Amino acid sequence: MSNSRFRKPADVQLTVQYQKGLDIVGVGAAGQVYNVDEHIVLKACRIYEPPSEQDTPRASPCCGSSPRIRTRNIIEAIHTDHPEGIYLRKYQPLSALAPTSSSQSDRVHWYRDLLRALLHLHRLGIAHADLRRDNVLFDHRRHALLSDFGAACPFGRPNPSLPVLLLNGPSETVSAATDHFAMGSLIYELETGARPDLSADDHGALVLPQIHTRHAGLDALVENAWRGHYARTEDMLEHADCLDALPDSREPYERPIPRAELTARITQWRNTRQEHHGCVLYSLPTDLQLHILAERYGWNLDDELRFP
Ligand SMILES: Nc1ncnc2c1ncn2[C@@H]1O[C@H](COP(=O)(O)OP(=O)(O)O)[C@@H](O)[C@H]1O
Ligand SMILES: [Mg+2]
Protein backbone atom coordinates (compact mmCIF):
# COMPACT_ATOMS: atom_id res chain seq x y z
CA MET A 1 0.00 0.00 0.00
CA SER A 2 1.37 3.38 -0.91
CA ASN A 3 2.61 5.54 1.96
CA SER A 4 1.27 8.66 0.30
CA ARG A 5 -2.14 7.72 1.69
CA PHE A 6 -0.93 8.14 5.22
CA ARG A 7 0.66 11.53 4.82
CA LYS A 8 -0.58 13.48 7.76
CA PRO A 9 -1.18 17.19 7.62
CA ALA A 10 1.93 18.88 9.05
CA ASP A 11 0.00 20.69 11.77
CA VAL A 12 -1.87 17.70 13.18
CA GLN A 13 -0.48 15.13 15.60
CA LEU A 14 -2.26 11.84 15.00
CA THR A 15 -2.71 9.26 17.74
CA VAL A 16 -3.71 5.70 16.98
CA GLN A 17 -7.14 5.00 18.48
CA TYR A 18 -6.95 2.70 21.51
CA GLN A 19 -9.42 -0.17 21.11
CA LYS A 20 -10.79 -1.08 24.54
CA GLY A 21 -10.80 -4.79 25.32
CA LEU A 22 -8.68 -5.78 22.31
CA ASP A 23 -5.14 -7.19 22.29
CA ILE A 24 -2.86 -6.41 19.36
CA VAL A 25 -1.11 -9.48 17.91
CA GLY A 26 0.75 -7.64 15.18
CA VAL A 27 1.42 -4.21 13.76
CA GLY A 28 2.24 -3.66 10.13
CA ALA A 29 2.76 -0.78 7.75
CA ALA A 30 -0.94 -0.53 6.96
CA GLY A 31 -2.74 -1.34 10.18
CA GLN A 32 -3.14 -3.36 13.33
CA VAL A 33 -3.98 -7.02 13.79
CA TYR A 34 -6.19 -7.73 16.83
CA ASN A 35 -6.83 -10.96 18.66
CA VAL A 36 -10.43 -12.16 18.36
CA ASP A 37 -9.89 -15.55 20.00
CA GLU A 38 -7.35 -18.38 19.90
CA HIS A 39 -8.21 -19.20 16.26
CA ILE A 40 -9.15 -15.84 14.70
CA VAL A 41 -7.57 -12.41 14.24
CA LEU A 42 -9.00 -9.17 12.85
CA LYS A 43 -6.76 -7.21 10.48
CA ALA A 44 -8.01 -3.62 10.56
CA CYS A 45 -6.91 -0.40 8.98
CA ARG A 46 -5.02 2.00 11.23
CA ILE A 47 -7.66 4.15 12.90
CA TYR A 48 -6.66 7.48 14.42
CA GLU A 49 -8.22 9.23 17.38
CA PRO A 50 -10.31 12.20 16.38
CA PRO A 51 -8.19 15.15 17.68
CA SER A 52 -11.27 16.83 19.16
CA GLU A 53 -15.03 16.42 19.32
CA GLN A 54 -15.47 18.64 16.27
CA ASP A 55 -12.86 17.01 14.06
CA THR A 56 -13.45 14.14 11.72
CA PRO A 57 -11.92 10.77 12.58
CA ARG A 58 -9.05 9.79 10.33
CA ALA A 59 -8.11 6.38 9.13
CA SER A 60 -6.25 4.78 6.33
CA PRO A 61 -9.07 3.73 4.03
CA CYS A 62 -8.32 0.04 3.75
CA CYS A 63 -6.38 -2.74 5.39
CA GLY A 64 -4.78 -4.58 2.52
CA SER A 65 -7.43 -7.13 1.76
CA SER A 66 -6.36 -10.16 -0.20
CA PRO A 67 -7.63 -11.44 -3.48
CA ARG A 68 -10.14 -14.18 -2.63
CA ILE A 69 -7.83 -17.07 -3.12
CA ARG A 70 -7.54 -20.18 -1.07
CA THR A 71 -4.83 -22.75 -1.20
CA ARG A 72 -2.91 -24.72 1.39
CA ASN A 73 0.13 -22.45 1.52
CA ILE A 74 -1.74 -19.15 1.73
CA ILE A 75 -3.35 -17.90 4.94
CA GLU A 76 -7.08 -18.32 5.10
CA ALA A 77 -9.37 -15.30 5.14
CA ILE A 78 -12.56 -16.22 7.02
CA HIS A 79 -14.63 -13.09 6.47
CA THR A 80 -13.75 -10.13 4.27
CA ASP A 81 -16.94 -8.06 4.03
CA HIS A 82 -17.25 -6.37 7.41
CA PRO A 83 -16.38 -2.64 7.39
CA GLU A 84 -13.90 -2.89 10.30
CA GLY A 85 -11.47 -5.14 8.44
CA ILE A 86 -10.81 -8.73 7.46
CA TYR A 87 -11.05 -11.73 9.75
CA LEU A 88 -8.27 -14.25 9.28
CA ARG A 89 -7.52 -17.67 10.65
CA LYS A 90 -4.85 -17.20 13.31
CA TYR A 91 -1.33 -18.52 12.76
CA GLN A 92 2.08 -18.20 14.40
CA PRO A 93 4.86 -15.80 13.37
CA LEU A 94 8.36 -17.18 12.88
CA SER A 95 9.42 -15.70 16.24
CA ALA A 96 6.94 -17.99 18.03
CA LEU A 97 8.68 -21.07 16.59
CA ALA A 98 12.08 -19.96 17.84
CA PRO A 99 12.21 -21.98 21.08
CA THR A 100 12.34 -25.16 19.02
CA SER A 101 14.80 -23.76 16.51
CA SER A 102 14.67 -24.98 12.95
CA SER A 103 17.08 -27.25 11.09
CA GLN A 104 18.17 -26.47 7.55
CA SER A 105 15.97 -29.36 6.36
CA ASP A 106 12.94 -27.77 8.09
CA ARG A 107 13.67 -24.52 6.33
CA VAL A 108 14.05 -26.16 2.93
CA HIS A 109 10.50 -27.49 3.43
CA TRP A 110 9.33 -23.94 4.27
CA TYR A 111 10.90 -22.63 1.05
CA ARG A 112 9.02 -25.29 -0.90
CA ASP A 113 5.77 -24.33 0.92
CA LEU A 114 6.25 -20.67 0.00
CA LEU A 115 7.18 -21.41 -3.59
CA ARG A 116 3.97 -23.45 -3.91
CA ALA A 117 2.04 -20.43 -2.61
CA LEU A 118 3.82 -18.19 -5.13
CA LEU A 119 3.17 -20.68 -7.92
CA HIS A 120 -0.55 -20.48 -7.17
CA LEU A 121 -0.53 -16.67 -7.21
CA HIS A 122 1.64 -16.45 -10.30
CA ARG A 123 -0.68 -18.75 -12.24
CA LEU A 124 -3.36 -16.13 -11.57
CA GLY A 125 -1.03 -13.41 -12.89
CA ILE A 126 -0.65 -11.87 -9.42
CA ALA A 127 2.61 -10.84 -7.73
CA HIS A 128 2.76 -10.81 -3.91
CA ALA A 129 5.24 -7.89 -4.08
CA ASP A 130 6.00 -7.82 -0.33
CA LEU A 131 7.57 -11.20 0.40
CA ARG A 132 9.62 -10.99 3.56
CA ARG A 133 9.99 -12.61 6.95
CA ASP A 134 7.16 -10.66 8.68
CA ASN A 135 4.74 -11.78 6.01
CA VAL A 136 5.34 -15.49 6.51
CA LEU A 137 3.23 -17.29 9.14
CA PHE A 138 3.11 -20.92 10.29
CA ASP A 139 0.28 -23.32 11.05
CA HIS A 140 0.26 -25.63 14.09
CA ARG A 141 2.12 -28.29 12.10
CA ARG A 142 4.89 -25.89 11.08
CA HIS A 143 3.89 -25.47 7.46
CA ALA A 144 4.89 -22.03 6.15
CA LEU A 145 2.08 -19.87 4.75
CA LEU A 146 2.23 -16.73 2.68
CA SER A 147 0.49 -13.78 4.37
CA ASP A 148 -0.22 -10.04 3.90
CA PHE A 149 -1.57 -9.31 0.45
CA GLY A 150 -1.61 -5.55 1.06
CA ALA A 151 0.83 -4.96 -1.81
CA ALA A 152 -0.27 -7.84 -4.09
CA CYS A 153 -1.25 -6.77 -7.59
CA PRO A 154 -1.44 -8.00 -11.17
CA PHE A 155 1.86 -8.44 -13.06
CA GLY A 156 2.96 -5.29 -14.81
CA ARG A 157 2.01 -2.84 -12.03
CA PRO A 158 4.76 -0.54 -10.66
CA ASN A 159 7.20 -2.17 -8.23
CA PRO A 160 6.03 -0.80 -4.85
CA SER A 161 9.41 -1.14 -3.14
CA LEU A 162 11.30 1.19 -5.49
CA PRO A 163 13.27 3.39 -5.33
CA VAL A 164 14.50 2.88 -1.79
CA LEU A 165 14.36 -0.83 -1.04
CA LEU A 166 15.69 -3.54 -3.27
CA LEU A 167 13.11 -5.94 -1.83
CA ASN A 168 11.78 -6.97 -5.24
CA GLY A 169 14.91 -6.21 -7.22
CA PRO A 170 15.49 -3.26 -9.53
CA SER A 171 12.66 -3.99 -12.00
CA GLU A 172 10.24 -1.09 -12.55
CA THR A 173 7.24 -3.43 -12.60
CA VAL A 174 6.23 -6.53 -10.65
CA SER A 175 6.21 -10.04 -12.08
CA ALA A 176 6.99 -13.62 -11.05
CA ALA A 177 10.69 -12.66 -11.27
CA THR A 178 10.33 -9.86 -8.69
CA ASP A 179 8.80 -12.33 -6.20
CA HIS A 180 11.64 -14.80 -7.00
CA PHE A 181 14.08 -12.02 -6.15
CA ALA A 182 12.40 -11.39 -2.78
CA MET A 183 12.28 -15.14 -2.15
CA GLY A 184 16.07 -15.26 -2.70
CA SER A 185 16.51 -12.53 -0.08
CA LEU A 186 14.20 -14.29 2.37
CA ILE A 187 16.16 -17.54 2.05
CA TYR A 188 19.41 -15.62 2.49
CA GLU A 189 18.06 -13.98 5.67
CA LEU A 190 16.70 -17.18 7.21
CA GLU A 191 19.95 -19.03 6.49
CA THR A 192 22.43 -16.35 7.57
CA GLY A 193 20.40 -14.37 10.14
CA ALA A 194 20.97 -11.06 8.30
CA ARG A 195 19.18 -9.21 5.50
CA PRO A 196 21.32 -9.23 2.36
CA ASP A 197 23.20 -6.05 1.57
CA LEU A 198 21.92 -5.42 -1.96
CA SER A 199 22.73 -2.35 -4.00
CA ALA A 200 23.19 -1.12 -7.53
CA ASP A 201 26.47 0.27 -8.94
CA ASP A 202 26.86 3.53 -10.90
CA HIS A 203 25.69 1.80 -14.09
CA GLY A 204 22.59 0.36 -12.40
CA ALA A 205 24.04 -3.18 -12.24
CA LEU A 206 23.17 -5.19 -9.15
CA VAL A 207 25.86 -5.68 -6.54
CA LEU A 208 25.19 -8.94 -4.69
CA PRO A 209 26.72 -10.13 -1.42
CA GLN A 210 28.63 -13.40 -1.08
CA ILE A 211 26.19 -16.23 -0.40
CA HIS A 212 27.23 -18.79 2.22
CA THR A 213 24.29 -20.83 3.47
CA ARG A 214 26.40 -23.97 4.10
CA HIS A 215 24.34 -25.69 1.40
CA ALA A 216 25.62 -25.35 -2.16
CA GLY A 217 22.15 -26.01 -3.58
CA LEU A 218 20.61 -23.20 -1.52
CA ASP A 219 23.43 -20.84 -2.51
CA ALA A 220 22.62 -21.53 -6.16
CA LEU A 221 18.86 -21.13 -5.55
CA VAL A 222 19.39 -17.68 -4.02
CA GLU A 223 21.82 -16.53 -6.69
CA ASN A 224 19.60 -17.72 -9.56
CA ALA A 225 16.62 -15.94 -7.99
CA TRP A 226 18.54 -12.68 -7.64
CA ARG A 227 19.92 -12.91 -11.17
CA GLY A 228 16.48 -13.62 -12.66
CA HIS A 229 17.51 -17.04 -13.98
CA TYR A 230 14.14 -18.72 -13.35
CA ALA A 231 11.88 -18.14 -16.31
CA ARG A 232 8.94 -19.60 -14.38
CA THR A 233 8.08 -20.22 -10.72
CA GLU A 234 7.73 -23.93 -11.60
CA ASP A 235 11.48 -23.90 -12.38
CA MET A 236 12.40 -22.40 -9.02
CA LEU A 237 10.12 -24.85 -7.18
CA GLU A 238 11.56 -27.77 -9.17
CA HIS A 239 15.06 -26.66 -8.15
CA ALA A 240 13.96 -26.38 -4.48
CA ASP A 241 12.31 -29.81 -4.67
CA CYS A 242 15.62 -31.34 -5.83
CA LEU A 243 17.67 -29.91 -2.95
CA ASP A 244 19.15 -32.30 -0.44
CA ALA A 245 16.96 -32.36 2.70
CA LEU A 246 15.61 -34.91 5.15
CA PRO A 247 12.16 -36.22 4.22
CA ASP A 248 9.23 -34.04 5.25
CA SER A 249 8.12 -35.47 8.63
CA ARG A 250 5.36 -32.93 9.28
CA GLU A 251 1.76 -34.08 9.61
CA PRO A 252 -0.33 -33.09 6.57
CA TYR A 253 -2.26 -29.82 6.45
CA GLU A 254 -5.38 -29.83 8.56
CA ARG A 255 -7.68 -27.05 9.75
CA PRO A 256 -7.96 -27.40 13.53
CA ILE A 257 -11.45 -25.83 13.46
CA PRO A 258 -13.77 -25.81 10.44
CA ARG A 259 -14.35 -22.53 8.66
CA ALA A 260 -18.11 -22.53 9.35
CA GLU A 261 -17.46 -22.61 13.08
CA LEU A 262 -15.08 -19.67 12.81
CA THR A 263 -17.68 -17.69 10.86
CA ALA A 264 -20.22 -18.31 13.63
CA ARG A 265 -17.68 -17.22 16.26
CA ILE A 266 -17.07 -13.97 14.37
CA THR A 267 -20.79 -13.18 14.33
CA GLN A 268 -21.00 -13.86 18.06
CA TRP A 269 -17.88 -11.80 18.80
CA ARG A 270 -19.16 -8.80 16.81
CA ASN A 271 -22.51 -8.92 18.61
CA THR A 272 -20.77 -8.96 21.98
CA ARG A 273 -18.56 -5.98 21.01
CA GLN A 274 -21.66 -4.07 19.88
CA GLU A 275 -23.42 -4.84 23.16
CA HIS A 276 -20.50 -3.88 25.40
CA HIS A 277 -18.94 -1.03 23.43
CA GLY A 278 -21.66 0.17 21.08
CA CYS A 279 -19.35 -0.56 18.12
CA VAL A 280 -16.93 -3.21 16.87
CA LEU A 281 -14.00 -0.75 16.65
CA TYR A 282 -13.85 2.75 18.09
CA SER A 283 -13.65 5.77 15.75
CA LEU A 284 -14.06 3.76 12.57
CA PRO A 285 -14.91 6.37 9.91
CA THR A 286 -18.27 6.16 8.18
CA ASP A 287 -18.49 5.79 4.40
CA LEU A 288 -19.38 9.47 4.10
CA GLN A 289 -16.38 10.54 6.20
CA LEU A 290 -14.12 8.33 4.09
CA HIS A 291 -15.36 9.94 0.89
CA ILE A 292 -14.77 13.41 2.32
CA LEU A 293 -11.23 12.44 3.39
CA ALA A 294 -10.53 10.77 0.05
CA GLU A 295 -11.40 13.95 -1.77
CA ARG A 296 -9.36 16.08 0.60
CA TYR A 297 -6.19 13.96 0.47
CA GLY A 298 -6.47 12.45 -3.02
CA TRP A 299 -6.92 8.83 -1.89
CA ASN A 300 -8.20 6.32 -4.37
CA LEU A 301 -10.91 4.38 -2.55
CA ASP A 302 -11.04 1.83 -5.38
CA ASP A 303 -7.41 0.88 -4.92
CA GLU A 304 -8.51 -2.42 -3.36
CA LEU A 305 -10.28 -3.36 -6.59
CA ARG A 306 -7.04 -3.78 -8.49
CA PHE A 307 -7.60 -7.47 -9.22
CA PRO A 308 -9.26 -8.32 -12.49
N1 LIG B 1 -3.49 -14.46 10.47
C1 LIG B 1 -2.63 -14.02 11.39
N2 LIG B 1 -2.38 -14.72 12.52
C2 LIG B 1 -1.51 -14.25 13.43
N3 LIG B 1 -0.80 -13.11 13.31
C3 LIG B 1 -0.99 -12.37 12.21
C4 LIG B 1 -1.92 -12.77 11.20
N4 LIG B 1 -1.88 -11.85 10.21
C5 LIG B 1 -0.99 -10.92 10.60
N5 LIG B 1 -0.45 -11.21 11.79
C6 LIG B 1 0.59 -10.45 12.51
O1 LIG B 1 0.38 -9.05 12.30
C7 LIG B 1 1.51 -8.47 11.60
C8 LIG B 1 1.01 -7.43 10.62
O2 LIG B 1 0.10 -8.06 9.72
P1 LIG B 1 0.24 -7.87 8.14
O3 LIG B 1 -0.88 -8.64 7.48
O4 LIG B 1 1.61 -8.24 7.70
O5 LIG B 1 -0.06 -6.32 8.03
P2 LIG B 1 0.62 -5.12 7.20
O6 LIG B 1 -0.05 -5.13 5.85
O7 LIG B 1 0.23 -3.90 7.96
O8 LIG B 1 2.11 -5.39 7.16
C9 LIG B 1 2.23 -9.66 10.94
O9 LIG B 1 3.60 -9.41 10.76
C10 LIG B 1 1.98 -10.78 11.94
O10 LIG B 1 2.91 -10.74 13.00
MG1 LIG C 1 3.06 -7.22 6.70
Image (tube, rainbow, N blue to C red):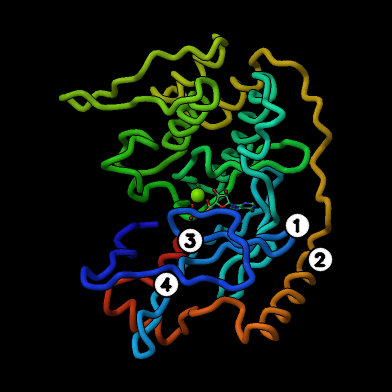
Earlier residue among tags 4 and 2: 4
- What residue appears at the point 43 percent right and 28 percent down from the top-left corner? 195
Q: Residue 196: image x %, image y %?
A: 40, 25
Could one spot residue 308 in this view of the protein?
A: no
Q: Residue 276: image x %, image y %?
A: 68, 83
Q: Which residue is mark 2?
A: 260
Label 4: few (<14), some or many (≥20) within 10 Å?
A: many
Label 2: few (<14), some or many (≥20) within 10 Å?
A: few
Q: Amino acid at mark 1?
A: Glu
**Residue depth check, mark 2 versus mark 3: number of the one nearer the observer:** 3
Q: Which residue is mark 4?
A: 48
Q: Residue 305: image x %, image y %?
A: 46, 66
Determine the image quadrant of residue 50.
bottom left
Q: Amino acid at mark 2?
A: Ala
Determine the CA span between mark 1 and mark 3.
20 Å
Could one spot residue 229 in this view of the protein?
A: yes
Q: Is residue 89 above or below residue 121?
A: below
Q: Is residue 162 above or below residue 169?
A: below
Helix, strand or loop at disc 2?
helix
Report the side of 80 relative to 189 (left or right): right
Mark seen at residue 38: 1
